[in-house]
Structures are given as structure tokens and as C-alpha cells.
């Protein structure tokens, strides 16, 4: 038998290199999956914060309230999140309108959502 006909299969080195390549690929896949999950969680929190801001503005419109100038804070929980809404009211050039800005955050964390709207004194 010649030396070429006796070689069947893979050597130990080839198997170890293949396992190392597969291990690196799996580790990269798991890391990418983890980053994706964190992104989805952050998106969920920001979506709930946006709903809280929209709810506060809708409540103001439904009550036909012409807000006073200044800034107020309210708890505005959504789901399991204890969110805080800060409502800032500024005067505009037209005295019948006021600019309302609602910022939503978790405790003293960064702003998760911000909405601007106009409130009017019109009937």
C-alpha cells in the first residue's frame, strides 16, 4: 500500500481548527442575539414612554384645559414602568395658544420620549 491510500479522514489538528472556527461563530451569534434583545427591551421602554406622553396630551385636550405657564411633574406609569412626565408650558406670540412640551423619563434618568403640542383657548 502506498502512503496516499492509507490516509482516510481528518487529522486531529484539522478537527481542532474546525471546532475553533465553529466556536467563534457560535460566540459571535450569541453576542449578536444579546445585543438584539437589549435593543428590543429599550424600544419597548421608549414606546411605553411615548404612549405616556401621548396620554397626557390627550387628557389635556379632552378636558379642554388651557394650561398655566410653567413646569409641572406627574407620575405617569405605563405597564410595569414607573415613569415621570414633566409638562413644560411656554407662551407663544399669539396669546390664544401655548406651547406644551411633555418629557418622559424613568426617575432621574435620561429623557425617553418628548412630544410638543399646542394648546388653544379657542372654543
Image (tube, rainbow, N blue to C red):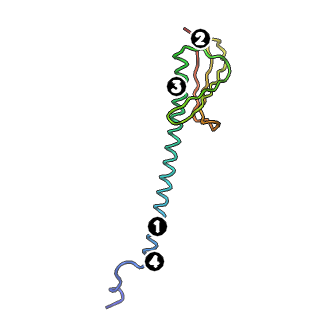
Classify 10 Å Cα crowding around label 2: few (below 14), some (14-19), many (20 and above): few
Q: Quadrant of the C terminus?
A: top right
Residue at x 49%, y 60% (from the top left corner) = 27
Classify 10 Å Cα crowding around label 3: few (below 14), some (14-19), many (20 and above): few
Query: Which callout, 2 or 1, points at the residue further toward the start of the chain?
Result: 1
- Judged from the image, the secondary structure of the residue bearing numbered disc 1 is helix
Discs 3/1, front: 3
Q: Residue 84: percent from the left, percent from the top?
A: 60, 31
Discs 2/3, front: 3
- Judged from the image, the secondary structure of the residue bearing numbered disc 4 is helix
- Judged from the image, the secondary structure of the residue bearing numbered disc 2 is loop
Q: Which residue is mark 2?
A: 121
Q: Which residue is mark 1?
A: 21
Q: Nearer the viewer, residue 73 or 119?
A: 73
Discs 4/3, front: 3
Q: Quadrant of residue 76?
A: top right
Discs 2/1, front: 2
Query: Which callout, 4 or 1, points at the residue further toward the start of the chain?
Result: 4
C-alpha separation, residue under disc 2 versus residue under disc 1: 68 Å
Q: Which residue is mark 3?
A: 55
Query: Which callout, 4 or 3, points at the residue further toward the start of the chain?
Result: 4
Amino acid at each position: 500500500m502506498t502512503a496516499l491510500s492509507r490516509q482516510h479522514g481528518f487529522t486531529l489538528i484539522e478537527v481542532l481548527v474546525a471546532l475553533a472556527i465553529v466556536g467563534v461563530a457560535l460566540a459571535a451569534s450569541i453576542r449578536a442575539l444579546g445585543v438584539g434583545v437589549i435593543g428590543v427591551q429599550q424600544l419597548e421602554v421608549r414606546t411605553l414612554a411615548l404612549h405616556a406622553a401621548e396620554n397626557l396630551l390627550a387628557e389635556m385636550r379632552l378636558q379642554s384645559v388651557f394650561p398655566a405657564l410653567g413646569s409641572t411633574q406627574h407620575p405617569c406609569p405605563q405597564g410595569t414602568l414607573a415613569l415621570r412626565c414633566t409638562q413644560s408650558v411656554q407662551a407663544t406670540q399669539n396669546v390664544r395658544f401655548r406651547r406644551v412640551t411633555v418629557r418622559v423619563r424613568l426617575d432621574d434618568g435620561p429623557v425617553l420620549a418628548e412630544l410638543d403640542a399646542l394648546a388653544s383657548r379657542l372654543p
